[in-house]
Amino acid sequence: MSLKPETLNKIIETSFKKGNELFKYKNYENSFKYYQRAVDTIVCRSRELKKSLGKEHHDARLVTLLDCCCASLQKTGDLTQAEKNAITMIELEPFTCKGYLRAIKVYRQLNKLDTAYSIACKGYTKIKKKKSADKNFKLNIVQYGKLKQEVISLKMPTPSVGQVSYNPMDKFPLEIIQLIIAQLEFKDKINCFYVCKSWYKVMSNSFQLFQDFSILKNLKKSQFEKFMKFINKNNNFNNTFLNNFTLQPIPSAEKFIIKELFNRKIRIKSLNILLKETHSSELLAHIEKSDMSFKESISSLTLELPIYESNSQSVRKIYHFFPNLTKLSIHVRRFDLRSIMCTHSASYELNKLEFFFLSFGQEAENHSLSGSFIHSLLGNVRMSNLKEFTMIGGNPLNYEYMQTIPATINKLKMIKVSGFTLDDFLTYILEAESYLGCLDSIKIVEKNTKVKRTIESWNEEDLITKGVFVNLTSFLLRDSQMTPRVFHKILRSVGERIKDFHIMNNYNLIFKKSELPGEHAPYGFVDIRKMILAIPHVENLSIVSVPGFSNKSINMISSVVSEIGHPKIIKSLNLTMNKINGDGIFTLLKIFKKISTLNISFCEVSPHDAETIRSMKHVETLIYKMSDKVQL
């Protein structure tokens, strides 16, 4: 080899570092290649030095590199080569422990315990004699102690032919074994099947170990196949359920895992399928062929996937496939442009569904097909027992989908659904012949809405007599074009049960003492006094980025609270992005006995006042970020 010693050293060091890095990330095959490259470089260099100097040259790094090679080979399963390397280590350095310890590990893995014991005794005896004879002999005490311990442990008698070996499973209580296995990750639990028959029996009798689990991206196809065989073998259709089953495989394994899952006769209570590449039509084709008892067992279904609709395969088929659904959640990642959205004239009744969730990812949210998909999925569908309806994103073609929402709805959440307003919902809901006043929570974040200049098609009297908001406990309105007139109508109709009240960045809700319109408020003002009187028992209050909200508004709040005597304790108060300073906050703190969390970010509160507030006992947690207007 004609390379300079400096270059050779650099090759050895670089290969060693790269091998360590790959080993760290469990890339054992490639880590071995780099270790072997370093070994070959040292061997070639030693041969050249032997020719030039006429004597053997030993590089101390060689044994360490051979040890690393053995470690990688053991991980890849090449135990024959690992054994050869370990023997070479012993031959190179017979008076160090490293080679003996590595050989013992290899022989243990080969299940050659007698050979391992022989090597351990040979090494320990040889090193012990050397240590006694040579006072200057340098010895690694830690490794020497390990070698001695190996001699002791390997000396323990092994069972003779016909003798039953000691099984710790027979001694440990079943509950302890269950607790140990419960702490393991899913893929490690699968490996426990093959430890011994006793372990398999314990796991078969402890089905609750698998009742809540997730199959995530790092799972191999073979591991999933083993698990499905175990489930299939031990499944009892009378009383055994997998409570919560989450599938999120890597894209390359999606089709295999979906096919494997729906080919089995199992029962699952809650199924969550999160896919990146496999689209809805492919999934529905597998579901259609699956066992009916499997489909009937599912009461909660979550799908996160790309949507591809056709004349033969529509996501709407889910209603037919899973007749016992009480919860349905669909997240659209993106749309396939080949999709043909069908209009379904036949009505469909979902009597058992209580929770419906539909959301659109970033790629799908503003897609031209989002409106057609909403119409295809919800057109002529009735959900008479629905308690919660959530839609996030999307661009509906019309308001027909609102017919899905029954008058008995408890919770309504509409986040950035293009064109949807609270006024539209009230127009629809008040047309119902009867309304039970079941609405408990309403959260609306508007998008692409305009001020409605026409008079509402509903009146305040209907709102009160039908008790739409009488049992309301949570109200959130954000980015809305609602006018103060409509806002006051809603305030006058709510009961006194509201605990959470949040108004955030609503352009026309300008605060003042009166409702009369002014030069900068063509639609009038919100009377803050009337607002506080309408929510006397509020616990979580947000008044964020509200035009006209100032220290005067806080004085008015303090006046009303002093007058009615409550609320005295606030769990959360968010006053972000308002024209209020430290004086206003100090006024509030004189009225409220306790505020768990106070948010005054981007207001006009000085850092000094913020520190004073933080030190007060009234406030447990203060969230404070300075506005650009604050000068230090």
Image (spheres, helix red, strand yellow):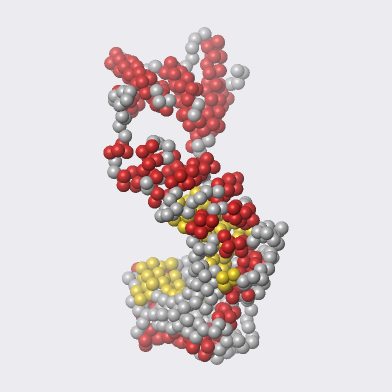
Q: Picture quarter containing residue 624?
A: bottom left
Image side of residue 65 versus residue 113, left or right: right
| Residue at figure coordinates x 50%, y 72% from the top left | 385
When the figure is inspected, residue 390 is found, relative to residue 537, above or below; the finding is above
Residue 127, percent from left and from top: 33, 18
Image side of residue 366 versus residue 538, left or right: right
When the figure is inspected, residue 103 is found, relative to residue 603, above or below; the finding is above
Residue 129, percent from left and from top: 30, 15
Image side of residue 476 versus residue 521, left or right: left
Residue 353, percent from left and from top: 51, 67
When the figure is inspected, residue 382 is found, relative to residue 494, above or below; the finding is above
Question: Would residue 128 be seen by someone viewing this image from the given angle?
Answer: yes
Is the N terminus in the top left, top right, bottom left or bottom right quadrant?
A: top right
| Residue at figure coordinates x 52%, y 43% from the top left | 225
| Residue at figure coordinates x 38%, y 72% from the top left | 571
In the image shown, does 276 or 585 lie closer to the viewer?
Answer: 276
In the image shown, does 521 or 266 lie closer to the viewer?
Answer: 266
